[in-house]
């Protein structure tokens, strides 16, 4: 290699060594708890040269059993901003994140002022699942008197109305720590909201033929989806938080199964094999296992839409004659 070529090569390498630390310092380090939140962040940072958010909950790890690894703790300590679903979805995570990252860096999406929040459904058999009032619509309490202090169901990402609203929350908070890109964040969020509105229309159309079908759900993680699209969930074995099956709920569900023909049995990643076996042994019903955390899709700006369409499609086809 000639002397001139060597000097040119050194100049190019020196240039990139100078540029790279500047990029690493300027790009916000984003940490999220679950993949659906990462998918929403990906829509807000679309076409902006910055790294993907770090996801804490890994595939195969239960939200009830997650323990932070040293590498995850370090990511929280170095985070510029942390987006969490909240409402106790992952046991102890909010407290740990505030300790490691600092309270000022935590954005809890379920706590955002206009988030739609539903109370945990206590009854195993849902007699009026389309019109129950155990919810907090846009922060306005509308609970039965005996459930004023009810826990909040944390599965709020399964309502596209929340997802659309959270896009604005994410853009606002990224703009706060990275004002140079504010216009891009807000533009992306606005475009993504249009896509979410179309998604909601598409899901409503998909679910239309399934109205009136009898669904039995192992773990009550679909309350937001049920309420938004009037799925018709008739019975649930465990509530939004419970891992243990109480004798009372089991008796109620078995009685319901004895009296009704269940057309579709729904399980999810939190459902044990024992529970699945119990359900499928009682009736000759169709059975689906839903991916509610987007594990089947790459983390990009289409993750949320693909996950939600898959949930809708599986529910619509399950038990169809």
Image: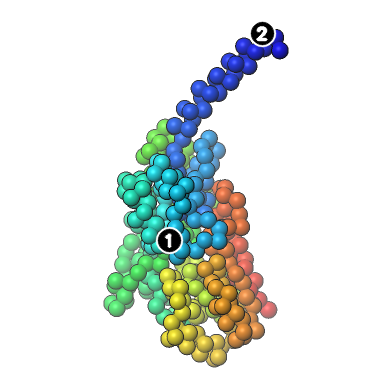
Q: Position of residue 293 (x, y in %)?
A: 53, 60
Q: Position of residue 254 (x, y in %)?
A: 52, 87
Q: Please say which color scheme the image uses.
A: rainbow
Helix, strand or loop at disc 2? helix
Q: Residue 115's quadrant in the figure?
A: bottom left
- Which residue ends up furthest to the right in the rendered image? 1
Q: Position of residue 60 (x, y in %)?
A: 55, 61
The quarter of the image holding the N terminus is top right
Q: 229 or 73, which is in the foreground?
A: 73
The alpha-carbon separation of the residues under discs 2 and 1 comes to 59 Å
Helix, strand or loop at disc 1? loop
- Binning the other alpha carbons within 10 Å of mark 1 as few (below 14), some (14 to 19) or many (20 upward) gives many
Vertical side of 11 occupied by 208: above or below: below
Q: Is residue 151 visible?
A: yes
Q: 261 or 105, which is in the foreground?
A: 105
**Residue at point 43% right, 82% down?**
246
**Residue at point 42% right, 48% down?**
73
**Earlier along the polypeptide chain: callout 2 or callout 1?**
2
Residue 281 is marked as none
The quarter of the image holding the C terminus is bottom right
**Residue at point 60% right, 16% down?**
10
The residue pinned by badge 2 equals 3
Query: Quick check: 26 left or right of 314?
Result: left
Query: Quick check: 294 left or right of 133?
Result: right
Q: Position of residue 156 (x, y in %)?
A: 44, 62
Residue 90 is marked as 1
* Circles 2 and 1: CB atoms closer than 8 Å: no
- Binning the other alpha carbons within 10 Å of mark 2 as few (below 14), some (14 to 19) or many (20 upward) gives few
Label 2 or label 1, whichever lies nearer to me, is: 2
Vertical side of 166 occupied by 213: above or below: below
Q: Residue 95's quadrant in the figure?
A: bottom left
């Amino acid at each position: 290699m000639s002397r001139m070529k060597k000097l040119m090569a050194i100049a190019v390498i020196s240039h990139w060594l100078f540029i790279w630390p500047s990029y690493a310092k300027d790009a916000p380090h984003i940490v999220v708890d679950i993949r659906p939140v990462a998918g929403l962040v990906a829509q807000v940072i679309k076409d902006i040269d910055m790294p993907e958010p770090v996801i804490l909950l890994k595939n195969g790890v239960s939200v009830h059993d997650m323990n932070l690894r040293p590498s995850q703790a370090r990511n929280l300590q170095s985070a510029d901003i942390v987006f969490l679903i909240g409402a106790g979805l992952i046991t102890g995570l909010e407290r740990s994140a505030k300790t490691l990252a600092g309270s000022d860096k935590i954005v809890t999406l379920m706590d955002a002022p206009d988030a739609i929040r539903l109370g945990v459904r206590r009854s195993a058999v849902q007699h009026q699942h389309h019109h129950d009032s155990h919810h907090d619509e846009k922060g306005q309490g509308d609970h039965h008197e005996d459930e004023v202090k009810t826990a909040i169901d944390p599965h709020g990402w399964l309502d596209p109305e929340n997802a659309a609203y959270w896009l604005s929350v994410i853009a606002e908070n990224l703009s706060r720590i990275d004002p140079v890109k504010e216009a891009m964040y807000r533009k992306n969020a606005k475009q993504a909201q249009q896509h979410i509105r179309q998604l909601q229309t598409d899901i409503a159309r998909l679910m239309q033929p399934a109205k009136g079908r009898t669904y039995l759900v192992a773990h009550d993680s679909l309350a937001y989806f049920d309420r938004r699209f009037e799925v018709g969930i008739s019975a649930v074995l465990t509530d939004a938080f419970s891992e243990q099956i109480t004798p009372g709920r089991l008796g109620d569900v078995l009685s319901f199964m004895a009296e009704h023909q269940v057309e579709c049995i729904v399980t999810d990643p939190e459902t044990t094999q024992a529970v699945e076996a119990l359900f499928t042994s009682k009736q000759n019903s169709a059975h689906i296992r839903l991916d509610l955390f987007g594990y089947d899709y790459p983390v990009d700006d289409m993750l949320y839409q693909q996950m939600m369409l898959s949930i809708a499609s599986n529910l619509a086809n399950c038990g169809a004659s």
